[in-house]
Amino acid sequence: MSILRRLTFLLFLGLCTLAIVPAAVGQAKIRDLKPTVILLGIDGFRHDYVDKYDPPHISRLARNGIRAKGLIPAFPTKTFPNFYSIVTGKYPANHGIVDNSFFDGEQTFRYTNLADAEASKWWIGEPIWITAEKQGKRTATYFYPGSSAAINDTKATLSRRYNGRVPNEMRIDELVRELGKPTDQRPAFLATYFSEVDEVAHEFGPDADEVRYAVLNVDRLVGRLVDALRTRGIADRVHLIIVSDHGLTTVKTENTVIVDELVDTNLYARNPITSRIIWQFFPKQGKVPEVLRALAAGKGMKCWEREKFPERFKYRGSDRIPPIMCVADLGWQLSTRESYDAERRSIDARVIRGDHGFDNIHRDMQGVFIGSGSSFKQNVVAEPFENIEIYNLMCKILGLTPAKNDGDINRVKHLLR
C-alpha cells in the first residue's frame, strides 16, 4: 500500500473508531492513582509543527503545561539513538545505539531487523522502564524503540514485539486498559510510539500538506487518550509527556554527493554502512588517512575520524562508532552513482523529500517536548534543552533513584513545580 493510500485509510479508520472509544477502553473511575507517566514518542515531529499546524489536542496540552521551544537531539539525529537517549539519559556513544545501523567489530546492528532490536547485547544503559521495575514499579511499553529487548536481564511487565500493522488506536487503548487494572497490577510508567509523521515527511518533505494531515491524525490519537483519561477521572493526575526523536529538513535531488566516485573501494576492509545522510567507512589497516584525503574532495558533506568528532557531539569512546563517518550538510544527501541516476530517471525526481541525521546544531533537527500533569508548571514555554534530560525528569516524577546517566536534573528542574 502506498503511503498516501495508507494515510487515507488511517484517517478513515480514525473516523470509524472515534465512536467506540468508551467501549474500547472502559469508563470505570480510577480513584487510587499513584504517580504515573505516559510517554508518547512521535517519530519526526519537528519543533514547529505545533505552531505550523495547530493540532488541537496537542496544542491544548502545550498551553496548559510545559512546552519547550525545541528538543535538542543527540548526534546523530536518527531515530533509534535518540529515542533510546530519551529513556536512558545517555548519549549514543554511552548507551550503545550509535546509529540506526552500525558495526561493532563482529556483527552489524540493523534497526529494521527484529532479531537485532530484541538482542540484549546491543542495549547499554538503563531505560526508565528497567529503573522502575528494579525499584518495585510495574511498567508497560507498546512498541517504544528498545523496549522489546531484555536489558540487564529485565523487561517491562508488559512489552510487545514491534509490528507496524497494529493500528495506532489499539496502542492507545491497550495502555488505557493497563491503567484500569487494580492498584497492585497497574503500571506507573507507560510508553508507546507512532511512526506516521516521520514516514509522510520523508516521502513528501517536512513542509508538505500531507504532513499536516499526518500531524492531525496523530493529534486525534492524543485526543483519544486524553478523553479516555478524562472518562476515568485521571486526566489531570497522569503525567503525559510527548516527545520526538528529531525534526526533518528539506532535501532536493540536485544536492547530492556521489560518494562512491570519491574513494577506491580497494581501500575498504568491508563495505560502508550507508543511508541518505550518513555513510560509515571501514578502511583497511593503515588506510584511514588515504580514505579521508579522498573524501575531502566531496562538496556538501563533512567527514570525521573516530575520536576526532567535535566535542559538542559527545560522540567518542565507543568501538561501535566507525573509523570514519561522513555526514551530509543540511539539505544535501549522500548517494552512489547508480542510486542517483535511478532517482533522476524516476518520476519522483521532481519531488522534494525530507530527511534527518544531520548535525544536531541545526534548528530543523530539533523535536518536540510537551509535559502536562500536576508536577509540571503550567502555561510555560521553555528554552530548548537536550533530550538526555528527560530521563531524570521522569525519575523525579515517579520518585525513582535514577541510574547513572549523562543528564542533570538541575538543568531542567525549572520545568517542575
Image: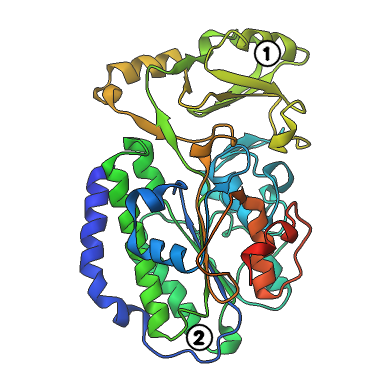
Q: Is residue 305 left or right of residue 64?
A: right
Nearer the observer, 295 or 165: 295
Pointer 1 residue: 292
Q: Compute the Cα span from label 2 to label 1.
A: 58 Å
Q: Quadrant of the N terminus?
A: top left
Colouring rule applied to residues: rainbow
Q: Amino acid at mark 1?
A: Leu
User: Secondary structure beneath disc 1?
Assistant: helix
Q: Is residue 397 above or below residue 214?
A: below
Q: Is residue 150 visible?
A: no
Looking at the image, is 43 positioned above or below residue 76? below
Judge by depth and name the residue closer to the eye, 176 or 241: 241
| Image quarter of residue 358 | top right
* Residue drawn at x 52%, y 77% as measured from the top left: 238
At a point 36% along the width and 87% down the height, the residue shown is 27
The answer to whether residue 328 is visible is yes
Q: Earlier in the sequence, mark 2 or mark 1?
A: 2
Q: Is 289 left or right of 214, judged from the image as shown?
A: right
Residue identifier under label 2? 181
Residue for point 53% across, 69% down:
378
- Give the amino acid at mark 2: Lys
Q: Quadrant of residue 262?
A: top right
How far across and down, in percent of the image, does residue 191 sit? Answer: 52, 65
Characterize the local packing of mark 2: few (<14), some (14-19) or many (20 or more) Cα atoms within 10 angstroms: few
